Amino acid sequence: MGHNRQDAMSTLVGMRLNGRYRLDAQVGAGGMSTVYRAFDATLERRVAIKLMHREIASDSDQLERFRREARAVAQLSHPHIVGVIDVGEDDARPYIVFEYVEGETLKDRIRRCGQLPIDEAVAYAIEIARALGAAHSRGIVHRDIKPQNVLIDEEGAAKVTDFGIARTLDDEGLTAEGRVLGTTDYVSPEQALGNDVTGQTDIYSLGVVVYEMLTGDVPFHGENQVSVAMKHVREDLPDVAVRRPEISASLGRVLDRMTDKDLGRRHRDARALVADLEDALAIEAARSGHSTGEATAVLRTLPEGARRRLPLRLRWHVPAALLVLAGVVTGVLIIFLGNEAADRTHRGTGAGSITAEPGTRIVSVTSKSAHAFDPQGDGAEHSSLAPLAIDRQPDTFWRTEQYHGGQITKQNHGDRQPGVGIYVDAKPQVEATRLKVESKPGWRAEIYAAPNGPAPTQFDGSWTRVGGGRVTKSEQSFGLDTSGKAYRYYLVWITRLPSDSDRVEISELALAAPRRG
């Protein structure tokens, strides 16, 4: 039956739909439809057409599903989604006209290249996640994210296609069918079990795609599709770091979270996922010092917070001649403004948007004086972002990594409560009376101080508790009890996350000390 249908559909090559679209070649076929490369005689351009099989078009439910796809995708306009141009019917055959993307599928690319460069894989994941964010914001879930449904165009960008089983979330009876509609190599546990499907389903499937881009293979194999689906339900994905040990721990954590079987721990939405992937891309680029393929283009689109992780040569794309000229100008300015520049470096950041209380002053520190502190973990807690907490720009921030259930999950060392932190180096030292924090409220912290000398690397007797409590407002001020002593290092030790968030983001930290004179 399948061969007869394919043979019958192949005979349509050369025909015109409604006198406008000439079918030039069959490029794909599925259970509901066949895809053709075609020519739009009216606008004189190449297009792709998905033509529904006639016997399926006679089924009113299937026909409505096909029309639903057209309506859903027609709502979407995004650079990383293959756009709908037109819909119609010819001789009882419904069809959808898409933009034609010259290139290859992501699956073809993986088959051809094997393991993709790490930064390129993350770049594709960002583009796909951005596309999913646009769809999810309209209540549309793709439900079949796989590399076969991602096209890589001639310029190297990813475009998501084939919303063939996409459904709007408010469709009645969306999950009542209890059927697995997605490809089981990439199917989420909840989809395999016939449970409710949300945008988190697409995030899981994209996580499996990321795994395949990094390792060159899907995580699970089995005797049949059902056995593979059950592995997605019951088994954790194999450790990607074993297959690709050079990836960063941060990227490994993002992938683990994308494919977490517990929806409470998986990324809640595509926006949160994009933010994590952008950080991961910046980390990978900073570690390698260069970018490859599509990663070069995606790096230019990162938000400022992520871009600050990058070496200068990756932040801007400037012609070499201008770089030479800039070097000459910089040299002249250094000579002309040397003393002032040195003075500014010494004085560092000022108060910015943070105001001092009467009788106090905001302690000025150098721009490199903030450091992440994670002695109970891997020693790094978004370390490169720490300076953003003292740059006096409220739209930039340092953030912790993601944790779950409101708890910082670390090894408990001695009598110190598990946590992570960020400290400020107030060199040479200062008797601070208050520490001010700008952030989203709801978390708890203890404030510690350490004397002049090398910065402590462990949570030991070097640190003295001087304050702490719950952050209850966006601009929180902690009183510090230093017993009249001057300290060099002041640590914000985070012990509890907000109840509605899996991390803490601090946009500004500032120490206040008694005003001199």
Image (cartoon, grey):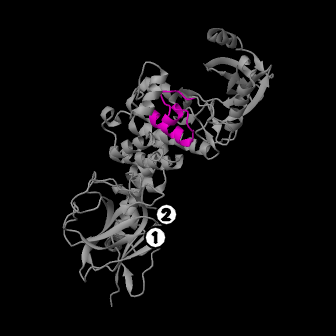
Count of numbered tags: 2
Question: Which portion, as a residue range, is magenta?
Answer: 181-209
Residue at position x 37%, y 64% in the image: 332
Q: Which mark identifies residue 472?
A: 1
5 left or right of 382?
right
Residue at position x 66%, y 41% in the image: 76
10 left or right of 389?
right
Mark 2 lies on a secondary structure that is loop
Does the image show residue 6? yes
Q: Where in the figure is residue 512, as x and y percent of width and height?
A: 36, 79
Q: CA distance from mark 2 to mark 1?
A: 20 Å
What is the three-letter code of the residue carrying label 1? Thr
Residue 281 vs 334, above or below: the answer is: above
Q: Quadrant of the N terminus?
A: top right
> Which is nearer the eye, 354 or 230?
230
Q: Residues within 10 Å of mark 2 (few under 14, many from 20)?
A: few
Q: Where in the figure is residue 414, as x and y percent of width and height?
A: 21, 60
> Which is nearer the eye, 159 or 300?
159
Residue tagged 2: 395
Q: Where in the figure is residue 337, as x and y percent of width and height?
A: 36, 71
